[in-house]
Image: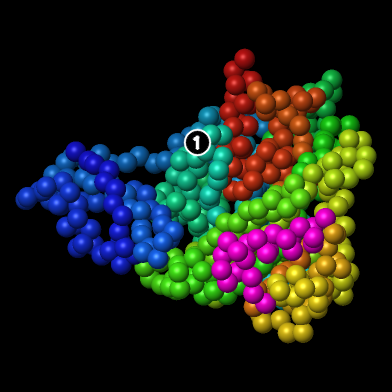
């Protein structure tokens, strides 16, 4: 027999095994029964000074017969099964490949970037020498953008698919089982690469294929049905079904689709800055003066407001994190954030971004690239303003609001370096004007947030894809081209690791349904 028991504990009590056992024993009125317990769910309630841990435990009597749990992932040999192509080895592509194996299809994955280990060397050159490899960077390569930029597993898309399955698969391939417990699960940039490699090895072991340095350069179709593709301008493959899981930064793919007459549309996204505080400052604000320690994880925050009919909100908040250079071309500057698994760096950073819609621009109905072009313009302006290097334009928060260049920058975790500039003169007014008003509002919501010790880095621009590839909501195929499955973030149907993974799996399930008919 087993029970789920819920308690509210202090942070110290939540670390005390003897206290928890006594609490469970009293709750169940155990006398001589021997039992075991494990965490089922865990979250922090810091709404008052009396901080609590919402604790849920699975309790089992030790004399019960325990059935050994089977693997989360169903293995089978698909080497001789029907083949289909997956373009991109990010979370959507990898989870699509794993789901295909479960369902008896052979996935052939083409990834423009490098494998995890080789990719790490290119990231070192970017951070230390400001050299951007356009095919191997924080956005392109095995595992996609999340591999080396955090690995947060939180999603609001719980109705879209099997959230638990995606988390269980991460555990199956080496992630900490606590991601099944935590309210906001996180693997960490230092641990996620090993998980990704294990996934790739399993795909190959089961008969699938994974090809690196393999860039999609053409798509072929006849009578509005997919017939094949071209890789690296040379190798041609015949496929009837292609999952397009290229990520939100693969701009060349959008241009390829447009050139081939495959319909794409402008899509709203968000753009702004990445703000960095000390983690101690965020802890003090969120934990009512208390600092994070062994009993409390580094504090995070989520902020949102409306300014002149546009949403302004925090994005990809990274406690104990680092700001990373995420450009995919040499003539642009892009920021993002990441945290190691322990989130134990001294800084906290988050994107603070303004929603942008196609209707903000003239002729948006005729130009599917209006939002993408705006995104590119901001990134290039920041690159030029900072001296045409990978250094990032920065400004202290209060100075930004006051419109003056910061004489001293307290610190920045952005490794390529920074240049102190007035971001009001670099960012478009549609962004800067709203950011200023939003920061004033956020300062009221979080006492201590609005400080000149906080540093803004510009831009935070890769929040989501500025282009959507329209698809049939029932078949998941492109609305005009059968056999082409626009997928996840790059196609405008996901926003993060988990939702992308779910979308990849659902595309495979759609292919199975079509083949069955």
Q: Is residue 488 left or right of residue 371?
A: left
Tell me which corner region of the image, top left, top right, bottom left or bottom right, holds residue 329: bottom right
Q: Is residue 431 left or right of residue 199?
A: right
Image spot of residue 55 (x, y percent): 33, 53
Image spot of residue 409 (x, y percent): 71, 81
Task: Look at 59% across and 24% down and name the residue there.
Answer: 512
Q: Secondary structure at mark 1?
A: loop
* Coloring applied to the structure: rainbow
Q: Nearer the viewer, residue 235 or 183?
A: 183
Image spot of residue 28 (x, y percent): 16, 46
Which stretch is magenta? 430-452
Residue positioned most to the bottom: 408
Q: Is residue 160 above or below residue 45?
A: above
Residue designated by label 1: 162
Residue positioned most to the left: 32
Q: Is residue 186 left or right of residue 135?
A: left
Q: Is residue 132 above or below residue 219?
A: below
**Res 329 seen here:** no
Q: State whether the magenta stretch is mostly helix, strand or loop.
A: helix
């Amino acid at each position: 027999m087993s029970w789920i028991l819920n308690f509210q504990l202090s942070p110290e009590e939540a670390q005390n095994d003897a206290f928890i056992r006594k609490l469970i024993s009293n709750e169940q009125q155990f006398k001589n029964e021997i039992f075991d317990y494990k965490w089922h769910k865990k979250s922090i309630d810091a709404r008052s000074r009396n901080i609590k841990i919402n604790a849920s435990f699975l309790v089992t009597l030790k004399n019960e017969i325990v059935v050994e749990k089977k693997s989360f992932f169903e293995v089978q040999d698909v080497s001789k099964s029907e083949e289909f192509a997956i373009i991109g080895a990010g979370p959507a592509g990898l989870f699509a490949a794993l789901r295909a194996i479960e369902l008896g299809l052979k996935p052939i994955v083409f990834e423009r970037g490098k494998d995890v280990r080789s990719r790490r060397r290119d990231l070192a050159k970017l951070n230390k020498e400001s050299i951007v490899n356009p095919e191997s960077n924080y956005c392109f390569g095995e595992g996609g953008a999340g591999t080396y930029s955090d690995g947060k597993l939180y999603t609001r898309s719980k109705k879209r698919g099997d959230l638990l399955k995606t988390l269980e698969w991460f555990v199956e391939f080496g992630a900490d089982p606590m991601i099944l417990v935590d309210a906001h699960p996180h693997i960490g940039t230092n641990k996620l690469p090993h998980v990704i490699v294990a996934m790739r090895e399993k795909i190959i072991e089961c008969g699938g294929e994974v090809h690196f340095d393999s860039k999609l350069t053409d798509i072929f179709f006849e009578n509005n049905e997919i017939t094949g593709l071209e890789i690296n301008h040379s190798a041609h493959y015949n496929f009837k079904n292609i999952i397009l899981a290229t990520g939100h930064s693969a701009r060349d793919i959008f241009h390829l689709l447009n050139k081939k007459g495959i319909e794409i549309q402008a899509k709203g996204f968000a753009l702004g800055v990445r703000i960095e505080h000390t983690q101690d400052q965020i802890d003090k604000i969120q934990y009512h003066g208390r600092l994070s320690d062994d009993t409390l994880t580094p504090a995070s925050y989520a902020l949102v407001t409306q300014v002149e009919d546009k949403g302004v909100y925090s994005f990809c908040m990274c406690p104990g994190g680092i700001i990373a250079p995420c450009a995919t071309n040499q003539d642009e500057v892009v920021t993002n954030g990441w945290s190691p698994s322990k989130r134990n760096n001294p800084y906290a950073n988050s994107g603070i971004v303004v929603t942008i819609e196609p209707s903000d621009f003239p002729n948006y109905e005729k130009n599917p690239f209006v939002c993408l072009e705006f995104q590119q313009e901001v990134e290039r302006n920041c690159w030029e303003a900072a001296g045409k290097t990978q250094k990032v334009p920065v400004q202290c928060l209060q100075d930004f609001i006051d419109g003056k260049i910061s004489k001293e920058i307290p610190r920045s975790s952005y490794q390529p370096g920074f240049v102190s500039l007035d971001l009001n003169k670099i960012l478009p007014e549609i962004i800067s004007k709203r950011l200023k008003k939003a920061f004033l509002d956020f300062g009221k919501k979080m006492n201590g947030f609005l400080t000149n010790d906080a540093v803004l880095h510009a831009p935070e621009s890769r929040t989501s894809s500025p282009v959507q590839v329209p698809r049939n909501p029932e078949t998941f195929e492109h609305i005009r081209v059968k056999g082409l499955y626009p997928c996840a973030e790059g196609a405008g149907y996901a926003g993060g690791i988990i939702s992308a993974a779910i979308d990849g799996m659902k595309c495979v399930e759609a292919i199975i349904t079509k083949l069955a008919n």
